[in-house]
Image (cartoon, coloured by chain):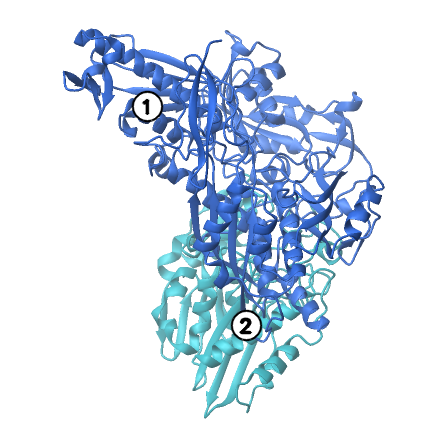
Amino acid sequence: MAREEYEMKVGFAADQKTVKIKIPDGDLKPWDLDTKFETVGTDVDRIDGIAKATGTAKYTFDVNLPGMLQGVMLRSNIPSGRVKKIDFEAASKMPGVRAIVPLKDPAEGRRNRVRWVGDPIAAVAADRREQALDAIEKIVVEYETSQAVIDMQDGEDAPKLEGGEITSPWPDKGNERMEEALGECKHTRSGTWFAEVQTHSALESHGHVCSWDDDKGTLEVWASTQATFGARFGLARALNIGGDKVTIHAEYVGGGFGAKFSPGTEGVACALLTREAKAPVKLMLDRFEEHTCAGNRPSALMQIRAGIDADNTITAWDYRCYGGPGYRGRGGRTTFPRSYLEDAHVRATQKDIATNTDAGRAMRAPGWPQGYFAGEGMIDALAEAAGIDPLEFRLHNESEKLREAEWRMGAEKFDWAKRWQPYGERDYGKRYLKGAGMASAMWGQMGHRGRGSPNAVKVRIHADGTVESRNGAQDIGTGMKTVLAMLTAEELQIPVGTIKVTMGDTNDPAGPASGGSTTTPSLAPAARLAAGMAKNELRTLVAEHLRVEEDKVTVENGRWGVPGGKTLLFEEACKLIGPQPIEKVGERTSNYKGYKNNVCGCQFAEVEVDTRTGFVRVTEMLGIQDCGTVIAKKLAESQVLGAMIGALSYTLHEQRIMDPKSGRMLNGDLMMYKIAGAADMPKLTAHMFPVANGKNSVGAAGLGEPPSVAGPAAIANAVANAIGAPVRNIPITPDQVLAAIDSKKGGK
Amino acid sequence: MRPFQLVRPDNLAEASRRAKGDKSLIKAGGIDVLDRLKERLENPEKLVNILDLKTDLSDIARDGATLRIGALSTLAQLANAGELEKSEWHAIRDAAGKTATPQVRNRATAGGNLLQLTRCWYRRSSSLGCAHGGDGPDCLAQTGENRYHAVMGGIDCFRVHPSNLAPALIALDASVRVRNDKDERTLTMLELYPEEPYADEAEHTLVSGEILTEILVPAQPAGSRSAYRDSREKESFDWPTTSAAVRMSIDSGKITDARICLGAVAPNPVFVPDAAALLIGKAPSDELFAKVAAKAYEGAEPLEKNQYKVRLGQATLIDTLEAAAAR
């Protein structure tokens, strides 16, 4: 492929570089530090905000088709064992029942295992939901039960814990060298941290509306999904039909947070039911199922021992983590901050402990908030050992230039010097103690071309001046549609409001699963390219119309034509288009070399602790976040604000509470599963830190995950700063705060 | 929920008649009852919707020295009632205003708040049979996950009474009017709750067909002021981990009279006259309040995971005493 070479200015104000990049033929000249934008980087309201706020946006839950049946699943009530027999006789005779599909096979070893309370046994479709619920009560299941492990501490591979500290020996591998590095330190610290299981709790539960056309042999699906193309693939395979026979719609998705990548057993069940009943079926999980059968952020038991040299540089770091990812026994890996550890001897050990509980799934920065909670907690402990301010300690050990700039910006905006309480004893006679904490973030997602058919965006310009931007992937609520609209507007120099964006239909060009913060960086360059190609096409029409050479036609101040000569407004130019609109598909190219491959970020928190009740109130949070080119500033800030709210909820409230005997989740609702609400909100501020990363024609980087990494650690560090003692269990509940204060008092 | 017949009575007598028998359930605001129906915890044949009688039962008005609160008054009404701004009754405002969310407060009724089912997660699970629901032999919380359960007063069931209003009304020495299709009777707030809250006792002492119609709050002794406070894990929509209501009279700097009731720590609201007695004749002070709090929780027997509630309950009571004294 022919490649054009450009010189680009990348980086940010304090760290500028000029790089030469070669781009594929036909791709647009990349935006860089010198680019002046019209629309990109401004505050534009979410284009579907009104539709969402007024209820005209239709989610999967809102889809109702003529003759539609209601699907319900029967789930295991035991945590461990086998299904010996299932009898559907009585259930099949219940009023309104139209189809039953078994989801376990007693005769088959792999398909009769019961792994947690909630394991799917069968699904029923009936005319009404209550009839389906009545029917599943009549399904007779004979179980053979076996010993279950509910708490990961009861697992075979669980480490020994004494007084909250892991006391099992450190692994042999590399231990001698590790001990040596620790031995050379001037100060060492160690500690054990634990983070409880958090459930995704998306407002819209998992589920589908599936409609089988028996004549055509096709399946039409409305899905609450983070991966429309993955859903098509999964459901086609489940029904053993061609991918061309399945269409997925996901125009609006009520949140996913990482738990909605595959159609899941509930999606397969819904598809099987509609085919069997020959009628559309809606099957949405109820709230208890959503908590117990749709994934979670795994728990993590972490221990770190680390040390610094006489220069306060971290020189040794030994990390081990026991993950609690549920019945699959994998997926509990955690990640700790490494940007402070350039001069350290580092060892990391990971082990997962299986339990008879729902399996963990990806959740917004999977494994990062847990690992950073422990890691940044250790950074604060080392700073205290060094006797220097945590900010100064971080700046000293920081290896990321970009974050260094962000630390400085954040510390100034947050007024860190005033809010952080110096080391020393706390006055527990005071009712309220305030404290401040900080933590770093890291992520690396610059988007990708896609496998098979490349990620692509289709732009149409109609003769009436209507512009469409279309992609088949989903907007899970991040504001992807607005991003596509803004990029199209930028390229065509027209107002954002004139662009109609359609997403979430698998008949449109391919797009990624929304995971790993990929959607924006993968689709943004394609959106820009498609708009650019359409613009060129329109320019050709204008040139023909004005009888000038094509390369003489420019677009300036919304006017198309020859500067100083005859020009047309966009609407006038569009009139040159006939009945067939201009239609261009921009395909995502591979990434360029660019500035750097990761994003950074940092967050600050201030808390006020009631020393009498142990109640923690977060009074303020501030996030500094880069994500390459900031396309939709308002929505980017919203991502950061939302992540900080999520962090507050995770750090202080959320926890899956299991009954140790039955293996059933006890707070599987939104009453006792505690999620922070409006009255718990602190003052929240987000500052975007624009960076020209030069990784693609837009320079976009993923933003979904990075702002959710630092928050829990920042809040936990603030609590420790306030009361002069760390609470190393998430959620930090009032009883633990009181216990920490007591231990400190007792230690005097 | 399973199908049921919705009864919309024209008057209380009819409501009471239709509500008799174990196949009927009375619904007021429906905050608690609809949850129970949807979770199939209860499957009545008849649901008697007394909310239809709201116009007759939702006044908050003075009748001489007494305050009469219609049982169908909403918590939002109570939280904003001008009549309750008077400091002696302020505990009612405090309690109603801190309950749940604005949406719930606009719907939930005073009567429903007093008569609701415990929020114990074992009792409220349709598939875990416990002694309180009658589907099992044991209290599952006693040896299970009991961080929010009773630290006192448990016999064979360690549920906690969830009402915010009840401790406030007990501290104010209130009573309730109750009627069936023929008769009417008055119960003190303490009589509304079982003397010995065994697992097989309901949360309240009303018998089938009886409807709570009115709450009567008497005039308080001269110089009275009252307050309600609770501890919780978050500010928005949470259940108290402990709560307390206090009424005290202060004359020339000395406490002359006091009533204290604890909430969320036992199967019933806990009236603690012995602790209140320590206040009499003394001037409010930190030491005094700490002593009273210790007395109120004397003999508490926490379970494995709720020891913290004893300390927290004392802190909450001290908070409440301070708030009342400061009014």
**Relative side of B2 to A576, left or right:** right
Residue at left 53%, top 74%? Answer: B319
Which numbered marker is on residue A431? Answer: 2
Which label belongs to residue A491? 1
Q: Residues within 10 Å of mark 2 (few under 14, many from 20)?
A: few
- Chain ID of residue with mark 1: A
Tint applied to chain A in the drawing? blue
Q: Chain of mark 2?
A: A
Instruction: Evaluate whether residue B34 shows in this view.
Output: no
**Above or below, A439 relative to A468:** below
**Quadrant where the C terminus of chain B lies?**
bottom left
Q: Position of residue A453 (x, y in %)?
A: 52, 13
Q: Considering the numbered disc 2 on the image, is that residue within a helix, a strand or a loop?
A: loop
Could you tell me which secondary element the residue under label 1 belongs to? helix
Chain painted in cyan in the figure = B
Q: Which mark is residue A547?
A: none
> In screen coordinates, is B156 left or right of A732?
right
Residue farthest to the left, as pictured = A565
Give coordinates of residue A723: x percent, y percent. Answer: 60, 65
The picture places residue A432, in percent across and down from the top left corner, at 53, 69
CA gap, disc 1 to disc 2?
Answer: 57 Å
